[in-house]
Image: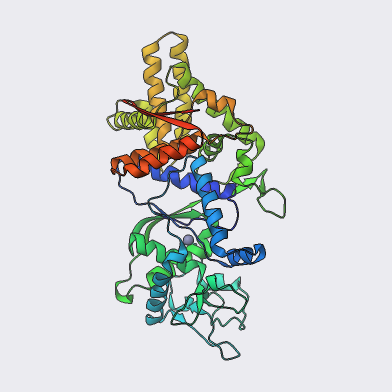
Amino acid sequence: MYVCGMTVYDFCHIGHARVLVVFDMVRRWIEASGYKLTYVRNITDIEDKIIARAVENGETISALTGRYIQAMQDDAAALGVLPPTHEPKATEYVPEMLGIIQELEANGLAYQDPLPNGEAGDVHFSVRGFPSYGRLSGKSLDELRAGERVSVADGKRDPLDFVLWKRAKPSEPEEAIWASAYGPGRPGWHIECSAMSCALLGRHFDIHGGGADLQFPHHENEIAQSEGAMSPVSRSPFVNLWMHNGFVRIDDEKMSKSLGNFFTIREVLERYDPEVLRFFILKAHYRSPLNYSDAALDEARAGLTRLYTALEAAGLDTQSVEARQQASQKALQGASEGASRVGLAFKVAMDDDFNTPEAIAELFGLAAEVNRHVAAKQDKEAKATALLLLGLGSTLGLFGQSAKALKQRGHGQTQLDALAIEAAIAERVDAKKRKDFALADAIRADLLAKGVALEDGPQGTVWRYL
Ligand SMILES: [Zn+2]
């Protein structure tokens, strides 16, 4: 699975939080279902906005992007998003991008026309040479062309042609310029994703994801590039399944900096626990629009607290990563064998295009059942039901902290967030499995420095604040 990641020149906003959380949910469900998954989420670290911001700040491009890559990874960890298998940076794949451009040129799909002053221009993709252009977004070439302005000055032969390689401009910093057969320059944004996905997943792979705003033109262009680079006689679909998550709106309005209703993940986490934001995102179907408002976040907090309170009441509060993994495996096994009606309903919902709202409704049903058993002093039944709740919720990346921590926090959290700690512990468990003890020790030392102690026991690793 390849997901278009962030362009790193500023802090991530809640639209980015949705992409991160939605595809983390997809990843967790695919893996929980027993499939082996390679998950690639790229980083765009060379692009017009990045260059402009670095020049404006008077810093190098790598200083700017390095800082925001770290901030993005911290935000993702806070939201309980596991690190992808590969997180390639565009600047590390420029030779692969040039390789695809050369293949496109050989197939008659790329051209470099001179500028009016005779200098070499940008390299463009020739859309008219790729007749199925527009298929993903369901638009014909004529319809798409009607919306485009015709401009001859930019060296394009057709208004829909898009740039593959941008020639260097004298005002641009050295760091933004690569040598190539087309002259010094840098890649266009679209070719970055074709090169990174092909390099890490091959020319044909299963799932490609991203925000709905990327379907046209970004993903349409990726298809044209990746398939266009293949030999015309053996051209096959680049991706089996395209998945696009819906837009985020704020108080029923479009989120935009000019409207003043633009929130970074950090701003939201100053007021809400990160797991509340994760839960809020997962309560909606990934394809639906998501409307952010304080009332909706308060409702998510109340709902999540209700689930935690049921776990706490049954004596199942604060579980280790391994205990949660075991509970998940058991819950899904019970579902597959037909032993658990709720487990099966949860699985059917998730298998039906990741229907998280219905899956979460099943969790609320379980919490009510736990509470009924607790009230009737049926401890064994209460615990068994709570274990199912814990197991199923864990497949969505929920329940990474204690009910007490969730209730205490929500305002002015300064300590390292529970979900970030859990993500670090999961990484350490993984490192130990691979016998990378140096990394495991480094993760423990890093957490200790941040005021979090780990204790390894027969039930797995538990953590506490110092
Ligand atoms: Zn992309």
* Image label count: 0
- Residue extending farthest bottom: 118
Find residue 385 and report its image quarter.
top left
- Nearest the viewer among 85 and 92 is 92
Residue at 60 percent of width and 73 percent of height = 148
Q: Position of residue 274 (x, y in %)?
A: 55, 37
Residue 135 visible in the displayed image? no
Q: Is the image coloured rainbow, by chain, by secondary structure, or in one colour?
A: rainbow
50 versus 336 height, above or below: below
Find residue 63 and report its image quarter.
bottom right
199 versus 68 height, above or below: below
Q: Position of residue 145 (x, y in %)?
A: 56, 73
Q: Position of residue 433 (x, y in %)?
A: 29, 40
28 versus 120 height, above or below: above
Residue at 43 percent of width and 17 percent of height = 315
Residue 230 visible in the displayed image? yes
- Nearest the viewer among 269 and 396 is 269
Q: Position of residue 196 (x, y in %)?
A: 41, 63
- Residue extending farthest top: 377
314 versus 217 height, above or below: above
